Image (cartoon, grey):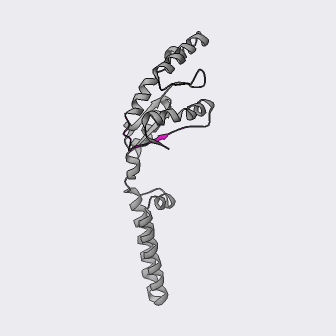
Amino acid sequence: MAENLGEAVSCLSERASKRLLLNLLLAVRQAEKDPHEEKALIRKLRQMYRDVLATADRQPIAPELQHRWHLAFGDSAAGSLRVGLSDIGADSRRVCTFAPDLSVGPLMRLDEAGGAVARTAWLRQYRDGDDRAEAEPPFGECIEALRAIPGADSLMIWTADMLMTELRWRWRRICCAAARVRCG
């Protein structure tokens, strides 16, 4: 059964919530008309309680989430997201990983080969001795993965409150344009 009632109620659809409320109000109205119906009302309330908890455990993933792709910045974040998605039964293969550190270096036209090459050259020139220039994964792989997302699907971009993530968030426009999808 669901761990708590609040979680179970939040899993109910609008239609199920309205149906539950209507049944509850009808039972209260019947109990007001006939005082002997109070025990029946309590039985109905207990059954509703059990039904809500049991229904929450059987809730499928919302259809709109089945076709959502996710973009996570960094291997660790992407891995955590994959685990979380698989725990709720979502397709964990719909996670694109974007690993480069955008806190240093040029950000112009990274969705084009020339922009990525210019960035790598800049990193090599100005970050001499820093392994980041050589270790940075190619932008092309991420861009190609985003371009492969069907236009009808949506893209959820996961961010956090950090400078590097803020720069990535600003780069989201390029990702959305490359994927040709609506971004969330």
Q: Is residue 122 left or right of residue 12?
A: right
Q: Is residue 1 left or right of residue 165?
A: left
Determine which quarter of the picture holds residue 91.
Answer: top left
Taking the magenta stretch, the answer to whether it contains residue 152 is yes
Q: Nearer the viewer, residue 107 or 79?
A: 107
Rendering coords of residue 29 (x, y %): 47, 84
Taking the magenta stretch, the answer to whether it contains residue 47 is no
Rendering coords of residue 26 (x, y %): 44, 80
Please provide the residue range marked out in magenta. Answer: 148-160
Q: Is residue 160 left or right of residue 142?
A: right
Rendering coords of residue 64 (x, y %): 40, 50
Q: Quadrant of the N terminus?
A: bottom left
Q: Is residue 34 above or below residue 122?
A: below
Q: Nearer the viewer, residue 171 or 56?
A: 171
User: Residue at 38% of width from left, 56% of height from top?
Assistant: 59
Q: Is residue 13 above or below residue 125?
A: below
